[in-house]
Amino acid sequence: AAYAATKYKAEMAKAEIDTVNFMAAPITDIKKLSQNPNDMKTKMELLIMKMQAEVCHALEAEEDEGTTFHVDRWERPEGGGGITCVIQDGRTFEKAGVNISVVQGHLPPAAVQQMRARGKILQEGPLPFFAAGISSVIHPRNPMVPTVHFNYRYFEVKNADGSVQWWFGGGTDLTPYYLDEDDSKYFHLTLKEACDKHDKTYYPKFKAWCDDYFHVKHRGERRGIGGIFFDDLDTPSQEKTFNFVRTCAESVIPSYIPLVQKHKDDPYGYSERQWQLLRRGRYVEFNLIYDRGTKFGLYTPGARYESILMSLPLTAKWEYMHMPSPHSKEWKLLEVLKNPRDWLGTGNATK
Amino acid sequence: AAYAATKYKAEMAKAEIDTVNFMAAPITDIKKLSQNPNDMKTKMELLIMKMQAEVCHALEAEEDEGTTFHVDRWERPEGGGGITCVIQDGRTFEKAGVNISVVQGHLPPAAVQQMRARGKILQEGPLPFFAAGISSVIHPRNPMVPTVHFNYRYFEVKNADGSVQWWFGGGTDLTPYYLDEDDSKYFHLTLKEACDKHDKTYYPKFKAWCDDYFHVKHRGERRGIGGIFFDDLDTPSQEKTFNFVRTCAESVIPSYIPLVQKHKDDPYGYSERQWQLLRRGRYVEFNLIYDRGTKFGLYTPGARYESILMSLPLTAKWEYMHMPSPHSKEWKLLEVLKNPRDWLGTGNATK
């Protein structure tokens, strides 16, 4: 009897998913997740749940005691849902959002058009899809601490013949208000090391892609000093691509938290705050005019726009014809935004 | 001899254009304007120059002495240019921009696509165009004073066979932070009276069009309480349409300045200011995500983006999941933004 009981418990343990540290219960029913442990949909959902919790806890550790993430678990009438975690008006973070979503349904025509425009071959008609992703923007209060953004996602589209197309996308990128060359190199190096574990060609390629993507075209400026960005990644295999995405996801905390710790108590004044607010205006311009994820989200009927727009800063400014004095610290940042640098000497910084 | 001299002077006077009150010299050479007084291009340029000056002077009259418009006259390498007038950080106006532009060149593909999407039949190939317009957004400091926007424009496109398509577009609309029903009715009535002088069907039609156009779709909210909006107007004749546009333009000052005078010294506190900043965030969302003029502008290579983005407020806020208390003054505004009202009882408020 003792043996049997032990065996039973061992089986339960194997089937159980440890949700204790998650910010909320997973979107997909635990039983379904337990029954399909090797399905990539399960693996991705569990990865983003785990990552959300780790990032939220790492950020809370930089805040005053009592400042914790507000957690909203929401469902989507068409299927799936998400968990949105937000700190607003904290001492360290003016606005920090970490969102996961696990959704399924039929691709809206605007999304199909967008995917085709970047070369996907998709059949006609309403295509069933599944998407699971984590997306986060952290806007600190101190202008000496950069804003970070990361997003990792997995996509499946089912064709009428039953075949499934899948791919991963994502990236991590940094938007400083004042340039610290050591920080920039450290940030890029952490991402490069994550990439190098999987493919030595990834970092230079995805670094250039990032500079190309986060481009405020009308101003001829990049949003920040970049990082890595990739999309439609479906080689060499589903398992290997997932492992790469996991390594990237795991590199977010080590790439960013040390910068928060280093600068969160730096002194600053009115003029640094004003410059930060102006740069946040540029952040808004990029996100609302160019960002594909934001557009895809907002054009989807019934989208949870509060979770999409969580990326916007608490406060932003627009001054007509603002131009920093030549050779000022602000001017030096602009130089780098206009001419992305090859931080690690890995080669030509174009996509 | 005396007779001859007098005659000569009279002829000069007829050909002269009075530019004394303009904010800067017209974009088109004065000589060319003088030689083509009956060309609609001339008439429109002179109308928007006059209107820009009148609006700027009317706004300066509401400011502290010494607060005057900063004037930038700029040229466009591809042809034409503009005059951008801005007050920033004034006591009455936190940011006020009044821009005119007179440009010619070839339509960028994105613009052709946009025009075709709304039903214009345009030939293939790079089409020569001319556009002259005035565009303005006035963001006052006091949250009890509404923001106003107006834009009036004339467009010509030349087909390969030499035929010219022309049309007018424009409108005036109000974005209050707190609803004052008397103000709303007064504003709409002033616009209705302008419309009624030309065609009794215009106001109800253009009022509904305005509600339809200034729609922050993802939120299911209108940007403000509306006004009038029209586009592609090319009937009953060029002369009559121009006269209608002139009457609309002339109604801007009487529709808005009394509201500034009534409320600019109203008391307000921190919470009213915060609400104003949040609503300005919505204004930014509309302008960057949906506004056709902004998109057309920013997608045009070499566009003067500072003049386009002059419409953005000096400061804006985004709070996650902000929702005013039921039946508060803020909540009452939202009700009207969600369900546009038929302010003058002129009929069904849909386009």
Image (tube, coloured by chain):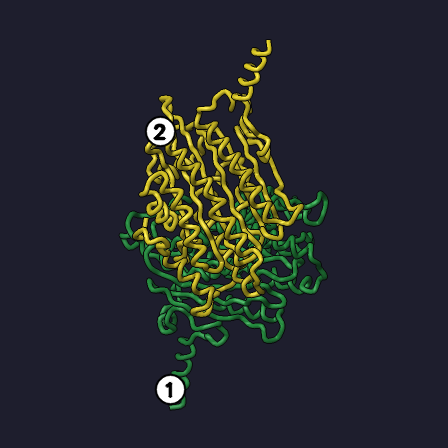
Chain colours: A green, B yellow
At a point 58% along the width and 72% down the height, the residue shown is A67
> Label 2: chain?
B
Residue at left offset 41%, top offset 28% = B127
Q: Residue B118 falls in which quadrant of the image?
A: top left
Q: Quadrant of residue A91?
A: bottom right
Q: Amino acid at mark 1?
A: Ala
Mark 1 and mark 2: Cα distance apart in space: 81 Å
Image-quadrant location for residue B153? top left
Residue B28 position, x and y percent, is 53, 27
On the image, numbered disc 2 is attached to which residue? B123
Residue A214: x and y in percent read: 54, 48
Q: Is the residue A18 above or below the residue B223 in the image?
A: below
Amino acid bearing label 2:
Gln
> Which mark is on residue A239?
none
Query: Which is more toward the observer, B37 or A292?
Result: B37
Please tell me which residue is depicted at 30% across the width and 53% down the height of the picture.
Answer: B348
Q: Position of residue B253 (x, y in %)?
A: 50, 44
Residue A132 versus residue A110 in the image, above or below: below
Residue under the point 27% across and 52% down:
A161
Determine which of the numbered discs, if any, sits on residue A4 in the image: 1
**Residue A333's x, y, as percent?**
66, 48
Instruction: Give left or right: position of A17 versus A126.
Output: right
Q: Nearer the viewer, mark 1 or mark 2?
A: 2
Judged from the image, the secondary structure of the residue bearing numbered disc 1 is helix
A317 or B52, nearer to the observer = B52
**Marks 1 & 2 on one chain:** no
Kindly tell me whether residue A196 is visible in this rendering.
no
- Residue B231 visible in the current orientation: yes
Chain ID for label 1?
Answer: A
